[in-house]
Amino acid sequence: MGFTFPEQCKVVKLYHGAANAVASDVVSCKNAHKVWIVAFHSGAADTDLVLSLAEHTAVGESAVAITATFPIWVDADVGTSSDALVRQTDAANYTINTGTSPNQLVVFEWDPAKFSAGYDCLSLADDDAGNASNNVCAFAVIESRYKADPPLTAITD
């Protein structure tokens, strides 16, 4: 049978809008084997943006910053001539330096086993910086623990 992306991974839009106010939706990871948060930043206004992950006890509950480190990959010059995702040093956040590389693709890899006790939901967080003229589009790719067609929901607990 092989790998079937729509049956083995759930894709959920987290945010699309101005880079100065990233307000990510929350996804439940209780049925997740692994989660990748993919964020695309575009725009030339020079205001750096720090992206990180936050954990929640349930969808709709308050966020707590994740301090554990995790793998991060970046294409620092994303566009039609670049597709090079480069592994960064594991960290708890990533800074998009818009002065040197305004258009970036960032991939955070999260292992749900790293959640703090009592937490099983995830969101993308920012440092309240960024620029209103720049944009961020982010989504979660969730590798389901239990394969199904259609995949189990991730937007409710």
Image (tube, rainbow, N blue to C red):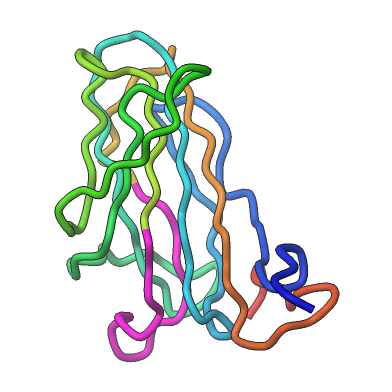
Which residue ends up furthest to the right in the rendered image? 149
Q: Quadrant of residue 151?
A: bottom right
Across and down, in percent, residue 78 comes to 42, 25
Give the total number of marks visible in the rendering. Answer: 0
x, y percent for residue 28: 56, 74
Q: Would residue 105 be found to the left or right of residue 9 on screen?
A: left
- The relative height of residue 27 versus residue 117 in the rendered view (above or below) is above
Q: Is residue 80 left or right of residue 49?
A: right
Quadrant of the image containing the C terminus: bottom right
Residue farthest to the front, as pictured? 1
Instruction: Name which residue lies at 27% across and 19% down.
Output: 101
Is residue 145 found left or right of 100 in the rendered image?
right
Which one is nearer the viewer's eye here, 56 or 6? 6
What residue is at 48 percent from the left and 31 percent from the top?
136
- Please state the extent of the stretch shown in magenta in the rendering: 109-125
Q: Is residue 18 above or below residue 108?
A: above
Tell me the quarter of the picture where residue 74 sits. top left
Hey, which quadrant is residue 108 in on the image? bottom left
Quadrant where the N terminus lies? bottom right
In the rendering, at what x and y percent does residue 149 appear? Answer: 85, 76
Report the residue at 27% width, 60% height from top: 71
Q: Which residue is nearer to you in this view: 43 or 81? A: 81
Tell which of 81 and 30 is nearer to you: 81
State the image coordinates of residue 141 (x, y, percent, origin top left).
Answer: 57, 60
Asked if the stretch drawn in magenta spans residue 72, the answer is no
49 displayed left or right of 22: left
Of residue 71 and residue 119, the one placed in the foreground of this image is 71
